């Protein structure tokens, strides 16, 4: 015989057992809901959002700032322990090291700024080439123009997506493959339309414009992948730390507080390296060239089919 208390315990256990799948499903739903900002839905598949490199760059800058302070403190400790008075030879060595640091910062800064300017100029050249090729579609036979105009619009859409996802290495690879496939489609359709054209000079002008459009895109993609080797940045940071240690050695002989001078050196060097990297990768940090994408977007908005003007029937008097 089962008493009332035992029957109640058995009933509660059965209810708890039956509720376990529902509780597990509820926990999974809550976890998915809280993880929603970390994923992006695309049709039936979910793709992770690319990492925000601006926070990574800011974190590296903060770590480098702290490392410079540590190098200065280590230099001050070594300076007090060694108690070197220095001389002409020591001053010459320090001057050469600091001069090398200044030259590296100057050349790296100038090169990064020039490369960013070159990429902006290449983007402008691509927009101009797209506009020229789009206008010269009118030189082809009317029957071939609608399909080519649609392919042009799809191609420019992929180019806009590529520029917006340059920092996302996985996404830009797939977008670049789609753009390359569209280039082949446009070229084959252009060659087929050129064969049917009765005016070879006009056809040659259109084909040259399409070729220039593809060349401009290739030049821009190649320029976006040109960067100094990582060893250059590592050596620049290492040299800045060495100079920070030399600064600490010199500050060890002073009797007054030097926190302000240490702060100025660490802040200036960190800001200089941060701006150099920001110039080199202008889509991941504070310096942005996203406004240049507006040129592509504006060109895409202007790519509309020409209006068909109905023939005018003359009125009889």
Image: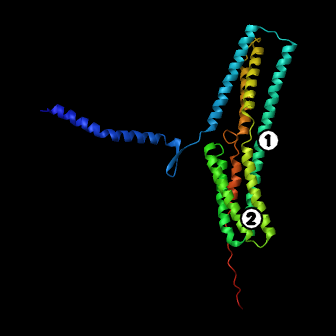
- Where on the picture, by quarter, is residue 264? top right
Of the numbered discs 1 and 2, the one sitting upstream in the chain is 1
Residue 3, quarter of the rendered image = top left
Q: Residues within 10 Å of mark 2 (few under 14, many from 20)?
A: some
Q: Secondary structure at mark 2?
A: helix
SS of the residue at dot 1? helix
Between marks 1 and 2, how big is the CA–CA gap?
32 Å
State if disc 2 and disc 1 touch (CB < 8 Å). Answer: no
Name the residue: 76% across, 53% down. 215
- The part of the image, by quadrant, that contains residue 305 is bottom right
Q: Position of residue 42 (x, y in %)?
A: 53, 50
Whether 107 is drawn above or below 262: the answer is below
Residue situated furthest right in the rendering: 88
Q: Decide if residue 168 is in sight here.
A: no
Say how the picture is coloured: rainbow
Does residue 300 appear left or right of residue 107 in this picture?
left
Tell me if I can see residue 6 in this picture: yes
Q: Is 266 left or right of 56, judged from the image as shown?
A: right
Residue that carries the numbered disc 1 in the rendered image? 114
Q: Position of residue 241 (x, y in %)?
A: 73, 22
Viewer-closest of 226 and 91: 226
Quadrant in the picture for the N terminus: top left
* Badge 1 density bin: few <14, some 14–19, many ≥20, Cα 10 Å: some
Name the residue furthest bottom.
317
**Residue at the spot x=74%, y=68% of the render?**
194
x, y percentage for residue 228?
75, 36
Residue at x 73%, y 24% (from the top left corner): 238
Residue receiving disc 2: 135
């Amino acid at each position: 015989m089962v008493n009332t208390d035992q029957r109640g315990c058995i009933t509660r256990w059965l209810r708890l057992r039956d509720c376990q799948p529902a509780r597990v499903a509820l926990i999974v739903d809550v976890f998915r809901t809280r993880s929603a900002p970390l994923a992006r839905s695309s049709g039936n598949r979910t793709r992770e959002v690319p990492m925000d490199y601006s926070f990574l760059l800011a974190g590296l800058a903060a770590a480098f700032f702290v490392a410079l302070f540590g190098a200065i403190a280590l230099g001050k400790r070594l300076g007090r322990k060694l108690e070197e008075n220095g001389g002409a030879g020591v001053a010459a060595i320090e001057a050469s090291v600091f001069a090398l640091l200044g030259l590296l910062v100057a050349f790296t800064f100038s090169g990064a700024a020039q490369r960013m300017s070159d990429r902006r100029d290449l983007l402008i050249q691509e927009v101009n080439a797209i506009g020229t090729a789009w206008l010269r579609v009118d030189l082809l036979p009317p029957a071939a123009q609608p399909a080519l105009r649609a392919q042009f619009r799809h191609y420019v859409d992929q180019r806009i997506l590529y520029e917006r996802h340059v920092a996302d290495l996985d996404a830009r690879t797939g977008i670049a493959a789609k753009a390359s496939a569209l280039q082949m489609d446009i070229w084959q359709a252009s060659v087929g339309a050129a064969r049917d054209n009765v005016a070879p000079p006009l056809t040659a002008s259109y084909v040259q414009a399409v070729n220039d459009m593809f060349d401009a895109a290739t030049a821009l993609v190649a320029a976006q992948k040109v960067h100094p080797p990582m060893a250059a940045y590592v050596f620049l940071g290492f040299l800045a730390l060495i100079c920070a240690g030399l600064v600490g050695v010199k500050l060890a002989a002073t009797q007054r507080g030097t926190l302000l001078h240490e702060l100025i050196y660490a802040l200036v060097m960190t800001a200089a390296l941060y701006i150099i990297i920001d110039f080199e990768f202008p889509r991941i940090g504070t310096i942005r060239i996203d406004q240049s994408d507006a040129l592509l977007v504006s060109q895409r908005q202007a790519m509309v089919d020409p209006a068909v003007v109905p023939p005018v029937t003359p009125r009889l008097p």
